[in-house]
Amino acid sequence: MKIKGKHYETIWFKPDNPSVVQAIDQRYLPFDFVIEDFNTVEDIYYAIKEMHIRGAPLIGVAAAFGIYLALLQYDHKEPLDLYIYKKAKLLKSARPTAVNISYCVDKIIGFISPDDPISVNTIRVMQEVISLMNIERENCKKIGEYGVKLIEDIYSNKGLKTVQILTHCNAGWLACIDYGTATAPIYNAFDKGIPVHVWVDETRPRNQGARLTAWELHQHGVPYTLISDNTGGHLMQHGMVDMVLVGSDRTTASGDVANKIGTYLKALAAYDNNVPFYAALPSSSIDWLTADGIKEIPIEERDGKELLYGETYLNGELKQFAIAMEESPVCNYAFDVTPARLVTALITERGICKAEKNSIFDLYPEKKPN
Amino acid sequence: MKIKGKHYETIWFKPDNPSVVQAIDQRYLPFDFVIEDFNTVEDIYYAIKEMHIRGAPLIGVAAAFGIYLALLQYDHKEPLDLYIYKKAKLLKSARPTAVNISYCVDKIIGFISPDDPISVNTIRVMQEVISLMNIERENCKKIGEYGVKLIEDIYSNKGLKTVQILTHCNAGWLACIDYGTATAPIYNAFDKGIPVHVWVDETRPRNQGARLTAWELHQHGVPYTLISDNTGGHLMQHGMVDMVLVGSDRTTASGDVANKIGTYLKALAAYDNNVPFYAALPSSSIDWLTADGIKEIPIEERDGKELLYGETYLNGELKQFAIAMEESPVCNYAFDVTPARLVTALITERGICKAEKNSIFDLYPEKKPN
């Protein structure tokens, strides 16, 4: 991903000082481009919780960086395994819905051995963080390569006219290391010269569509139009959407897709209008142990202030202003679950599969329960 | 409707000076309570177009007031019928989707006779405006009386627990003369002591739910919770909504319901979760001549700035703040159409009927085409 001609990813070791982690502070987008330094696991925890960094694949990798920073902070006052257990628990508590934090943290701490010197553990974990980043980057790239075929098919079926894609929230490269999940097929198609246009849902209340997706599509030069979250149904009724393409914070092994609140409504509209609905996700977002997404996936509730205040950027600072009665009671669920029956297919790093158990396990046979 | 103990309606002749019309300037709510004076039909046109006054029943009545003001302005330089035809056309052009402007304007100008002195015409029109207001007020009251039975049934079926109602946009007394359409059954139930709670959709991009519905429910003391437009589907999946109750800007004789953009998505979610979906509307909102709502009802497109800027109130003024990239292309449809198949029933001033031709004409036999 290039920003004003310079290549960026979302998170990295600080050049010349690898004891510091740096990431794009997404709170300031699209108004300003700010890079934040992280010195401690607590810094990472706070940045995930307060959404300086967000997006299921990215917060997983960021949490892995958190374990790395925790090792650098280790003062030998308690046993290493107990210390790491506490830090892992802290990181996992930052946000409940995406499964990626647990996945990445558990994977990383599997490389820590209390019998080895702390420096050896730290280096091994650093290598594994890099490996995890490489895998996540590569997985997004593969999602793009598989997913672009769906766009190419629509393009040829509709007589080489622009392919109209609706997306919700930000499942772009800002939510990952690079490429994005839902955006990976879009960038891939655009780079190949297939004409695409993206309907970008504003995504209330935090406006990730208006603030992040619009910004990154703009940076890449992909044509897009911003719409309110209410608009997608009308567009689909009038044949103005060829496919819905979203990411996922957690997908069950049965194909239920937890994603940003409001995704379910778009899936219903897609189903009602025979528009295909795809969720793009790396396997790090699959929850292999959960069967019923609606009943079992914990849905984060966030501060009601997200609805009562708008946010802008004035004199180098983010400013909040009241947009409703400040005393209004608010209910602010951050995610919903789209049942598998509404999902046309999942786009993964191993290919495209139906949103149902057998198809998913055909791609990931090693995950199949005995 | 009482505001801080004083009874108000939404529009009225100025006391002691009936050549001026006054209305609540809804742009300032919930931050301030401002009353605007209207001296000309052009004032009324502008106020409807710029949404100082909004809501299908109210803009119909306001347009009738506009014809009254036009008669007061008449300078005999052109024939009265031509003059009134032009003013009627102007008013009808203010907003395209609601049918109420045409309905009320056509009704009112039927009482103008070029053979009578202008003063006689003016007085007759004034009387008819009052009559129209009385009818609209009474119709909303009756919608409340019929609609409350649905709430009472749910209350008794769920073992006397609080009835959970979801509404979209503002179909409250602010959208009418008094009582409201969707809110009339709610106020009626609340006043009878039936415990109700309203999920109030924020209603992007103009936030009529957050700004107007929340405010008027708060004034009346009805418990409510503000939610993003994305949230209703999740609530319905989890059994947290007993009924969806909305207004309508135009309902076809076949039962298709045009209402604020996003209504269709809530109707889909209601249908998917076996939650009843009702539209409450006076017959002045029925378009007797249109059969296919999705193909035939013109959908207003509004300025994209409504999505790019948030609005707050500072030092006695409304202020806009950038909440997205100001150069983002925007598409801003104001309404969508919910097909009749998703509508459980219509609540009208003559009773409750199915959203289909025969049931509607059974209530309004005089409208039946020969």
Image (tube, coloured by chain):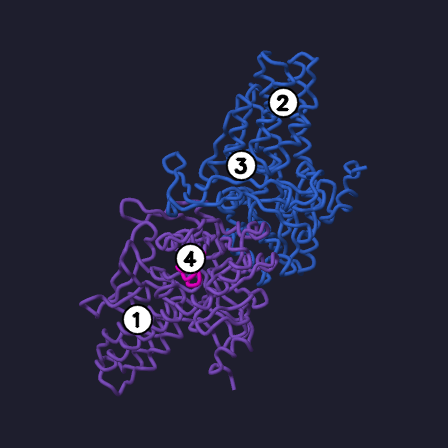
Chain colours: A blue, B purple
Q: Secondary structure at mark 3?
A: strand
Disc 4 from disc 1: Cα separation: 39 Å
Q: Nearer the viewer, residue B144 or A47?
A: B144
Disc 4 from disc 2: Cα separation: 53 Å
Residue type of the residue flagged with mark 4: Gly
Kindly check if marks 2 and 1 are in contact, taking CB atoms under 8 A apart as contact. no
User: What predominant SS class does the magenta segment belong to?
Assistant: helix
Question: Residue B193 shows which numbered tag?
Answer: 4
Question: Residue A3 shows which numbered tag?
Answer: 3
Which of the two discs, 3 and 4, sits closer to the camera?
A: 4
Q: Quadrant of the N terminus of chain B?
A: bottom left
Disc 3 from disc 4: Cα separation: 59 Å
Q: Position of residue A307 (x, y in %)?
A: 45, 45
Residue type of the residue flagged with mark 2: Tyr
Q: Residue at x 58, y 36 (%)?
A: A96
Q: Position of residue A169 (x, y in %)?
A: 55, 45
Which of the two discs, 4 and 1, sits closer to the camera?
A: 4
Question: Residue B66 shows which numbered tag?
Answer: 1
- Provide the residue span drawn in magenta: B184-194
Question: Residue A85 shows which numbered tag?
Answer: 2
Letter of the chain that mark 4 sits on in the rendering:
B
Local packing at callout 4 (Cα closer than 10 Å; few below 14, some 14-19, many 20+) is: few
Letter of the chain that mark 2 sits on in the rendering:
A
Kindly check if marks 4 and 1 are in contact, taking CB atoms under 8 A apart as contact. no
Q: Residue at x 24, y 78 (%)?
A: B122
Q: Secondary structure at mark 1?
A: helix
Local packing at callout 2 (Cα closer than 10 Å; few below 14, some 14-19, many 20+) is: some
Would residue B365 be visible to someone looking at this image? Answer: yes
